Amino acid sequence: MVRKSVAETAPRSWKVGADWLEIVQQGQTYTIPLAKLSEVRLRYEPGRFATNRCTVDIITNTGWTAQIDNQHWADVADFEDRSFSYRLLVEALLARLARANPSARLVTGQGAMLWASMAFVLLMVAVLFFVVLAIGGPIVAMLKLVVLLFFVPTMVRYVRANRRRIQPISDAPPDGVLPRIQSVTTSASQSPN
């Protein structure tokens, strides 16, 4: 069970059966036959406070979409990592969907518009860095550079994981779009589910 934000009054939950996916959200239960799923989208989407956040969007043949993620909102700037149960759910969903609807596709990564906007923001940050450096603010510029360097490992993982790929549902997802989990015994004991 997961709450995405303070706006959700009740946690959401999901269950994968032999040929169905059940979603309980805001007190309503939706049961979707896996044969009606046309696409599954996996992404690594870290945030400021949820640095290991991964999401999966499921899309039906009618265009209905639901999103599942591995982070549970506990409080302001406090997210519980539920990667172990999330990863088990996604792996079961992919395996059962491959049997129920082999024509479904697996899409991983981000689209071209997001990459273009990120490149623009990165270019503006570089320009700002050089402007501050040129007008005599080397200490401020260096502090900003140190802060940016702190996020380089997350950025590298983000870029590697979110290169857009479209593949058959039966293919294994590429590295990085499913969360890293320490080990089955460690994660199982930490899993709040």
Image: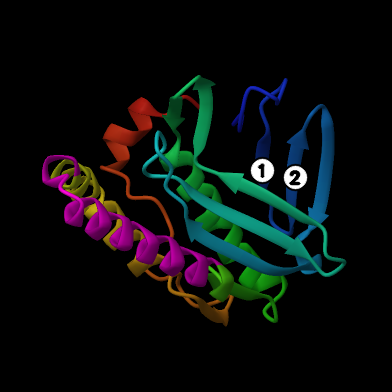
The residue tagged 2 is 22
Region rendered in magenta: 114-140
Q: Residue at x 82, y 47 (%)?
A: 31
**Neighbour class for label 1 at 10 Å: few (<14), some, many (≥20)?**
few
Which image quarter: residue 7?
top right
C-alpha span from label 2 to label 1: 5 Å
Mark 2, secondary structure of its residue: strand
The residue drawn where x is 40% and y is 38% is 48
| Residue 76 position (above or below residue 139) | above
- Going by the image, does 8 lie left or right of 64? left
Is there a contact, CB below 8 Å, between mark 2 and mark 1? yes
User: Residue 116 in the image: x percent, y percent?
Assistant: 50, 72
Task: Give the camera-side residue of 112 and 52.
Answer: 112
Residue 39 in the figure: left or right of residue 69:
right
Q: Position of residue 14 (x, y in %)?
A: 66, 41
Q: Earlier in the sequence, mark 2 or mark 1?
A: 1
Q: Which residue is mark 1?
A: 15
User: Residue 97's mark?
Assistant: none
